[in-house]
Amino acid sequence: MSESSGAAISLRGVERMFGEVAAVAGVDLEIAEGEFFSMLGPSGSGKTTVLRLIAGFDEPTAGAIELAGKPVQHLASYDRDVNTVFQDYALFPHLNVIENVEFGLRVRRIPKARRRQLAREALERMRLASFENRRPGELSGGQRQRVALARAIVVDPKVLLLDEPLGALDKKLREQMQIELKDLQRNLGITFVFVTHDQEEALTLSDRIAVFSDGQIQQVDTPENLYSAPATEFVASFVGTSNLFDEQAALRHLGLTGRYTIRPENLRFVATDSAEPGRLSGTVRNRMFIGASHRTIVEVDDLEISVLEPAGSPNREIGEAVAIDFNDSDVRKLRTTESIAA
Amino acid sequence: MSHASRTKVRLPAPPVTASRRLSSFFGKHRRLSLTALLAAPLAWLVLIYIISLLLLLVTAFWSTDSFTGQVVQEWTLGNFGAVFTEALYRAVTVRTLIIAVSVTVIDVVIALPVGYFMSKVAGPRLRGALVVAFLMPLWAAYLVKAYAWRTIVSPHGLLDSLGISPGLGLVATIITMSYIWLPYVVMPVYTGFERIPDNLIEAAGDLGAKGWKTFTAVIIPLVWPSVIAGSIFSFSLTLGDYIAVQIVGGSQQLLGTLIYANVGTGGNMPLAAATAFIPIAVIVIYLTAVRRTGALKNL
């Protein structure tokens, strides 16, 4: 990791202690220019802490942070060329929409006419042109979200940090905003660092994803690789659903040593009386219809195995004895948790 | 089977008692229950506050027989005429206003940094200690505080021995009243700062604003209604005060002491009532002026 000069953001050995507790520790990250980079993890996993360290709202207790090759860990947020879209938007309640968007331009002493023009352009880009005289309190969640985006991009940052920006929106609006965010990032061509606990959102939007757990990065990879080749048990279970085999189960059912995972969609039912019986056999516990597919939970000894089939597959009765098979190439070996801590 | 077990565990309905009937009656008649709840405090407010104010207004239009000292219940504008034309009243009104404004400005200037420090800088323990420290004077009697200041500013007092005493007079009155009313300004200003979310301050910094710019462009506008709310206390309380100035003000007179003198030694109730309308009018003007800031919602 020596080519830090090409990276928009570079973190090395970053640690943030709160008293005795490490919110994050040993974080190494290289985020490329123009990349849509997500930090994914459950709440309390340290992803927002890392975002705040990059933004400059907080200082690391150890390690180095570089923006475009320049060390910034001791710079205040107003001296960093990054802008943030806050989780609850943090719009100034005493200013109307256009004054909110103009705030960063006013601080930069841009003349009033030019300021208005730039702010209007940013609002038009967010399709909010007709709202410029409203107060934040008079806007819906989705509109506030877009004002917050306009306010951040109007000052032309090199990096945009987004802290769970879609968390407060309902499902439909969230999906629409995902598309808008992706378009925006493509058009602006700047680096987006996106914090989310929603794995689907991260997979949909990102060029690369860092998966956080307990203040440490579990894996940094493309969405495809995270999904098909999870490095750890945590990644396998957090990114999509997965069937996990610990050392004991792997030895017993797969004949392998170590820890393994198989995705539910890579399992298939085979006839119990065929010449090649499946390598797993058990009884159906539950069967759910989930739109485009059926999920069947099969009890294999003490394991609960989830099998995902396309809708229209033959029905399975609860209690029915079934056999399951898979391709060897879909069996993924996991790093043990110990090897991460090391 | 499930049916059998359900009948077995069925519990009796709650008994219909008198209090239960009453509750359900009031539950159905919301308006009636609201009236019942508000009747006593409303009666209190109307009797004690509004009627007494109206009586004051009426009294102001009566006069006193200069020979017997009895109130003569005949309508006259003479009291208001005296209050508006006599140089004494004009001078005292101006003096009282200057003192009320000075006290308010001093208290706000102290409350702003103190409130900011308490809400945004101090840790929870120091914050608690400071809140108690600023509230503590409220637990001491007014006279004790006023006399304490008298011993500090009077000749041969503490400040005099340091050679910096203003002596008894208007300056001492301003200092004493600033001290006595300070908690009433610090508390709303402190809670005003407390209500400003930290992420607004972060957002300002994120957009490039340094400390001073964040303070003037974000923090001050957001805390301003609370400052006004606090200033209403210090301004109105100073305007009506007549005790502190008698203790530390030397021979200076304020509106409060004029009213007091007219009621007491002067024995001229109607003139006192007319005089009392000066501070009332000033406060009404002040409240009307600050209503637009939204401060009244912050009280």
Image (cartoon, coloured by chain):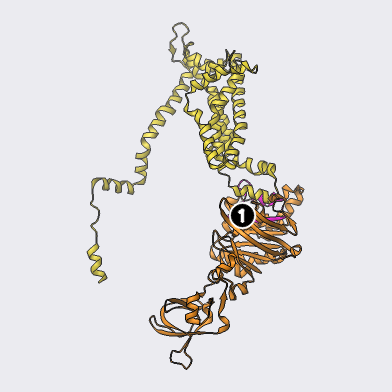
Chain colours: A orange, B yellow
Work out whether residue A58 or residue B70 is closer to the camera in this orientation and state it. Answer: A58
Circle 1 packing at 10 Å, graded few (<14), some (14-19), many (20+), is many
Q: Which residue is mark 1?
A: A16
Q: Which of A317 and A89 lies nearest the eye of the viewer?
A: A317
Name the foreground residue: A302 vs A72.
A302
The reply to whether residue A215 is in sight is: yes
In the rendered image, residue B57, in percent from the top left (x then y), is placed at 48, 22
Magenta stretch, residue numbers:
A80-104
Where, by quadrant of the figure, is residue A216 drawn?
bottom right
Would residue A120 be found to the left or right of residue B274 on screen?
Answer: right
In the rendered image, residue A213, in percent from the top left (x then y), is placed at 56, 63
How far across and how far down the image is residue B290, in percent? 58, 35
Q: Please name the amino acid that badge 1 sits on.
A: Arg
A95 is within the stretch colored magenta: yes
Most foreground residue, B155 or B254: B155
- Label 1: chain letter: A
Tell me: residue B238, above or below residue B207. above
Q: Residue at x 48, y 87 (%)?
A: A278
Percent of width and height locating residue A205: 63, 68
> Residue B298 lies in magenta, yes or no?
no
